[in-house]
Image (tube, coloured by chain):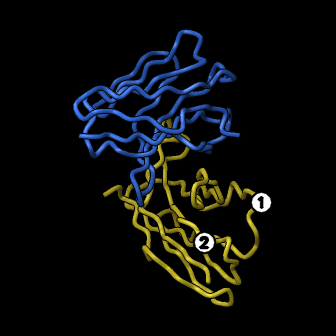
Amino acid sequence: ETGVTQTPRHLVMGMTNKKSLKCEQHLGHNAMYWYKQSAKKPLELMFVYSLEERVENNSVPSRFSPECPNSSHLFLHLHTLQPEDSALYLCASSQFDSRESEKLFFGSGTQLSVL
Amino acid sequence: DAKTTQPPSMDCAEGRAANLPCNHSTISGNEYVYWYRQIHSQGPQYIIHGLKNNETNEMASLIITEDRKSSTLILPHATLRDTAVYYCIVRVYNTDKLIFGTGTRLQVFP
């Protein structure tokens, strides 16, 4: 148990569906992240939120829309995805502006399949 | 770019020390070296990090060469549960993002 919970663990959706991934952290951290891990590829940083403001957006297509309503919750809203978006989506949190700000705590991820 | 180079895979016998190398020849003076691991179907787990000096914690030891161009993660007594992909990461200067490479797949066998 890392203190970061992601739901759902598995998700299958069609290309016309709209769904959301949820992440919740119980560590009191002030920064949250979305990473994407495609099969046999390195983790790709998608979004970073610090103090509930988005500070990083790595050229992610607009069909992925993040939302951070407070420091404990992070969402990734999905719409009109493509089959190549099938991947493991990982959420992480850290304590920004501390000596160990890069010590990320990851959730177990949501395995997404787009049909 | 990940800025690190690691062998794609390694094997280790259970109970023996696993020594995982990492090359980071372009590292800057104030960049840290971080190690994470990812067990199958789980999120990455922080192991250890260091700047110049060798570091040790309950999970592993980190040996950084004097010129800081390479490092080695040591698992002193590998177990089957240590089978995972191990990532060596250099923090991008003045940012708070970690860039993951392809890592080393460590297989611990009985």
Spot occupied by residue B17 in the image (x, y as percentages of width and height): 30, 26
Spot occupied by residue A46 in the image (x, y as percentages of width and height): 66, 59
| A66 in relation to B95, above or below | below
Q: Which chain is yellow?
A: A
Q: Secondary structure at mark 2?
A: loop
Q: Residues within 10 Å of mark 2 (few under 14, many from 20)?
A: many
* Cβ–Cβ under 8 Å for marks 1 and 2: no
| A90 in relation to B27, above or below | below
Could you say which disc has been placed on residue B23 in the image?
none
Identify the residue shown where x is 43% and y is 49%: B38
Spot occupied by residue A25 in the image (x, y as percentages of width and height): 42, 62
Identify the residue shown where x is 41% and y is 33%: B48
- Which is more toward the observer, B101 or B83? B83
Quadrant hosting residue A115: bottom right
Quadrant hosting residue B98: top right
**Amino acid found under the numbered disc labelled 1:** Ser
Note whether residue B11 is visible: yes
Identify the residue shown where x is 49% and y is 71%: A111
Identify the residue shown where x is 56% and y is 32%: B6
Chain for disc number 1: A
Please report whichever mark, 1 or 2, sits nearer to the chain's N-terminal start.
Answer: 1
Q: Secondary structure at mark 1?
A: loop
Q: Which residue is mark 2?
A: A86
* Alpha carbon distance from label 1 to label 2: 17 Å
**Amino acid found under the numbered disc labelled 2:** Ser
The reply, left or right, for residue B56 in relation to residue A74 is left
Quadrant hosting residue B90: top right
Q: Which residue is mark 1?
A: A59
Query: What hue does chain B carry in this figure?
Result: blue
- Which is more toward the observer, A77 or A73? A77
Note whether residue A34 is visible: no
| B60 in relation to B38, above or below | above
